[in-house]
Image (cartoon, rainbow, N blue to C red):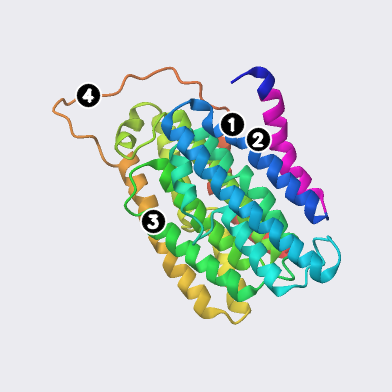
């Protein structure tokens, strides 16, 4: 990519969500979302490969449809209330349409179909940006209007996302698609608790970013994209490969790892609000995700590739190991002991 273009695209990618988060005017927030969308499309299509171009087109069409629906909802709500203030949203139809538009931008079920295909057609670095940074602005908007949102609708979207995120990842062999379905499932947990506790939603989002970033950076360092090549990654960086299993179990939400903490608190909050059935369904649906995380861990740490030679190994390159990656793995898997402190703060 042209360096002059990069000096415009990268700051725009950072600036877009910042504009949306700091604004209290609907049009300014919408402009921030558009700047962010237009900045990331050249980065997705940068490879000049048919799959990358296809991913960029799919992303563009989906985000454009969501932006059009969001703008129509904003105009409809402003016509009713007479102001563009984000927090002063009173029209029920506008709230529902804004929820649908932002769910489409996030990739929540049933608007999730673009996310696995887009992530599969791009690089691991772009997958990291799409699953973490790109979720920031829509979630911030949902937090700003959480008092006007429909709790049963968000609960339905959350349960459906947890179910689809677990079910869709069961038969996948591509790691980027698996991380896409993992993102859908985690977003389901966040959206389900949004109207009940915004602090708990933020805690879930922070732990999700920590675990997902660590996993994708590990995949990038190990230079693997498929489940079949995971079987030979132990010959490159054995210690990192073993620590990756901890991160996978944390993503699955197994105790006593970090990923268990937000799920436990969400189930506790749902039970306090007399939503025991919803809590039970969410816990059951999350077992589907546990299966494919265990599958990756099994392939990468336990299974050996079938070969006729007794000592066949991959050539061990001198890899430039990221200095922060071990610390990130520890953070993303061993924060549960501070849960009492977080509970007191919240």
Judging by the rendered image, the residue that carries numbered circle 3 is 168
Residue underneath mark 1: 42
Residue 289: give its label. none
Q: With respect to residue 214, does 344 lie above or below? A: below
Which tag, 1 or 4, sits closer to the chain's start?
Answer: 1
Q: Residue 170 location in percent, x, y?
A: 34, 54
Residue 307: x and y in percent read 17, 30
266 in relation to 224, above or below:
below
> For this rendering, which residue is in front, 122 or 181?
122
Kindly identify the residue that appears in the image at 76 percent across and 43 percent down. 18
Q: CA distance from mark 2 to mark 1?
A: 7 Å
Residue carrying label 4: 312
* Image quarter (top left, top right, bottom left or bottom right) of the C terminus: bottom right
Residue 256 at least partly seen: no
Image marks 2 and 1: residues in contact by CB distance under 8 Å? yes
Distance CA(mark 1)–CA(mark 4) = 41 Å
Marks 4/3: CA distance?
34 Å
Q: Which residue occupies the extreme bottom position in the image? A: 274
Would you say 298 lies left or right of 15 here? left
Where residue 39 is drawn, which disc sits there? 2
Left or right: 304 in relation to 240: left
* Numbered disc 1: secondary structure: helix
| Magenta highlight: main SS | helix
Assess whether mark 3 and mark 4 are in contact (beta carbons under 8 angstroms).
no
Residue 228 is drawn in which quadrant?
A: top left
Q: Residue furthest right?
A: 82
The magenta stretch spans which residues?
A: 6-23
């Amino acid at each position: 990519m042209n360096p002059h273009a990069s000096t415009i695209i990268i700051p725009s990618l950072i600036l877009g969500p910042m504009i949306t988060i700091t604004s209290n005017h609907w049009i300014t927030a919408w402009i921030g979302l558009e700047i962010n969308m237009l900045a990331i499309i050249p980065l997705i299509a940068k490879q000049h490969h048919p799959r990358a171009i296809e991913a960029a087109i799919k992303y563009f069409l989906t985000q454009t449809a969501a932006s059009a629906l969001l703008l129509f909802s904003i105009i409809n709500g402003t016509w009713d209330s007479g102001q563009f203030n984000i927090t002063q949203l009173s029209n029920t139809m506008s709230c529902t349409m804004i929820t649908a538009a932002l769910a489409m931008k996030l990739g929540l079920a049933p608007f999730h179909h673009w996310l696995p295909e887009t992530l599969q057609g791009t690089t691991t670095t772009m997958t990291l940006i799409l699953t973490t940074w790109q979720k920031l602005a829509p979630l911030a908007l949902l937090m700003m209007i959480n008092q006007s949102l429909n709790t049963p609708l968000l609960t339905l979207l959350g349960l459906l996302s947890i179910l689809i995120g677990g079910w869709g990842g069961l038969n996948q062999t591509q790691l980027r698609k698996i991380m896409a379905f993992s993102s859908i499932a985690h977003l389901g947990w966040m959206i389900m608790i949004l109207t009940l506790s915004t602090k708990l939603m933020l805690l879930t989002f922070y732990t999700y970013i920590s675990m997902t970033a660590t996993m994708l950076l590990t995949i990038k360092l190990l230079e693997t994209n498929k489940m079949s090549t995971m079987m030979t990654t132990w010959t490159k960086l054995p210690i990192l490969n073993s620590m990756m299993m901890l991160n996978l179990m944390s993503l699955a939400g197994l105790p006593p790892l970090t990923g268990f903490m937000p799920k436990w608190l969400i189930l506790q909050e749902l039970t306090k609000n007399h939503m025991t059935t919803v809590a039970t369904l969410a816990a059951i649906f999350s077992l589907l995700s546990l299966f494919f995380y265990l599958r990756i861990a099994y392939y990468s740490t336990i299974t050996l590739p079938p070969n006729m030679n007794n000592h066949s190994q991959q050539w061990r390159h001198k890899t430039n190991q990221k200095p922060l990656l071990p610390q990130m793995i520890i953070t993303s898997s061993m924060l549960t002991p501070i849960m009492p402190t977080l509970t007191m703060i919240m």
